[in-house]
Image: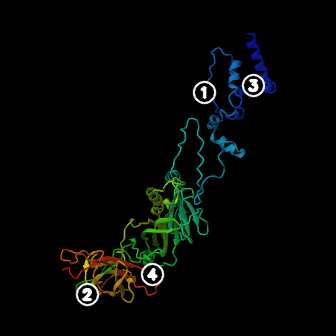
Amino acid sequence: MFVLIAVALVAVLYTRLGNGGQPAPAESAVPGAASQQGSTDARPDLLAEAAPAQDTPSSVSLGSARDQVATVPDDAFAGLLEGSRSGDARQAAAATGAPGAVPAGDAQQPGSPVTAQAEVAPAHDEEDEPAEEDQGTEAATDAAAPPNALTLAGGVVTLTYPTGLALATSGQPVQVASTIPPCDAGFDYCFYLPEDAFAGTNFRAAGMGVTLREDLTARLSCLLAQPDGYQALQPGLVVPGLESARQDEGGSVERESTVDATSTGPATSRFGGLGEGAAGTYYNGEERRLFVDGACYAFTTRVVESQFGNYPAGAVVEFTAEQREATLARFDDVLASATVTLGEGVEPVAWPRAGTSDLAPFIRLDEPAAGELVTSPVRLSGEAVGPWYFEGSFPVSVVAQDGTVLGNGFVSAQAEWLVDGLVPFTGEVEFAVPAGGSRDQASADEQGAATSALPVTLVLARDNPSDLPEHDAALHVGVGLKSPSLP
């Protein structure tokens, strides 16, 4: 008994000496919690729950119990107490660099490049649900924050884009190192994924470049001019209705029109299937065009990857086709948000569906139909817009699959062609049938007669006296050459 009393007296004297001779405050009963005295939310019951369990008899005195608690390390409750700090307290702690402080100035500004750093979660009271972890994908990041709005130079076209995309404007560097950049040089705007997107895979870059094409000042040229480095691509089109001129049986011209052919409303085109490779790196993408209010905008999207087979086994995870499509879809969403402001009105931009190829708003071939068997001379008829003609005609070629030109000719307008609307045309083109037909497509029956036709393409080209490539355009229609042995 005397031993226990002596131990208790020693403990009391030790406590008074450690507090400058003053009694120890009740809230300081736990050494290591003194640095948290400013927190009024710390609860004794939580502290007791956090203390390690000990095999202590129920008759232990207060003094010996205190000695046991004093063995807890100083930072044992740091996380618990930090979670109970109010949002104001955490903000105030930022000035001193205290743990858990919210750094000043980290709020994302609209239109500024987005870094790959995770956002600091707001402080929660003890009663709040714990913050969800591993939100995971860039798509989740996009959904978590409101999009930014960007009005392109000129004040007509407006886009919205998620905070998960970085934005560089003309003259600014794109913070991505890739053999093929996310946007070509000369862009006016470049939306792109941060460099560490899809880290640990063979993904290299992804972006959408926006360029004002000052060289394409006419609607026809803007929508149909081939993307750089490509030929014979036929885009899908969405164009306001054009006037159609037809001749009746008596030779007079009938015009059908529901929309002004000179409308300043938005017209769009879509070139799919773009791709290129360099030094083991390649990309997939597309180019869209928008012609509105006399201006032409090009939107070029791409996803860049390195050849997965070039990496040592296990070095990276393969970037999947599903991830590629999901990445391209993020840029599709930006374009789907596009609106144009004309006068007092705002209207959405309609884009062609992916995979479509239809030049009907500008030129239509009625005869022969696609896939039809033809002989020389082939007779053609249809309609084309006035700017397709020069001096009332435009050229037509018959081209074999290997690129050999089998014949050339012209078709002529059958009505006044100095108009913006559709004008009927007719004409004939002679061509030479290759000797022996097609070895690849033709087969022989039991008598040795050819039973299939040679596939060729009718190319109805826009007459372009300037020879400038930006004014080139052509309709490609596949037909078959009827073999002489066929009836």
Residue with the mark numbered 2:
251
- Distance, label 3 to label 2, CA atoms, is 112 Å
Query: Mark 2: which secondary structure?
Result: loop
Residue with the mark numbered 1:
49
- Distance, label 1 to label 2, CA atoms, is 99 Å
Q: How is the image coloured?
A: rainbow
Give the percent coordinates (x, y) of residue 473: 41, 79
- Distance, label 2 to label 4, CA atoms, is 32 Å
Label 3 Cα crowd, 10 Å radius (few <14 / some 14-19 / many 20+): some
Numbered disc in front, either 1 or 3: 1
Label 1 Cα crowd, 10 Å radius (few <14 / some 14-19 / many 20+): few
Do the CB atoms of the residues marked 1 and 3 lie less than 8 Å apart?
A: no
Compared with residue 403, is residue 266 higher up or lower down, i.e. above or below? Answer: above
Residue with the mark numbered 3:
24
Chain-order first, disc 3 or disc 2: 3
- The one nearer the camera, 341 or 188, is 188
- The one nearer the camera, 405 or 29, is 405
Q: Is residue 344 visible?
A: no
Residue at image position (47%, 81%) is: 469
Chain-order first, disc 2 or disc 4: 2
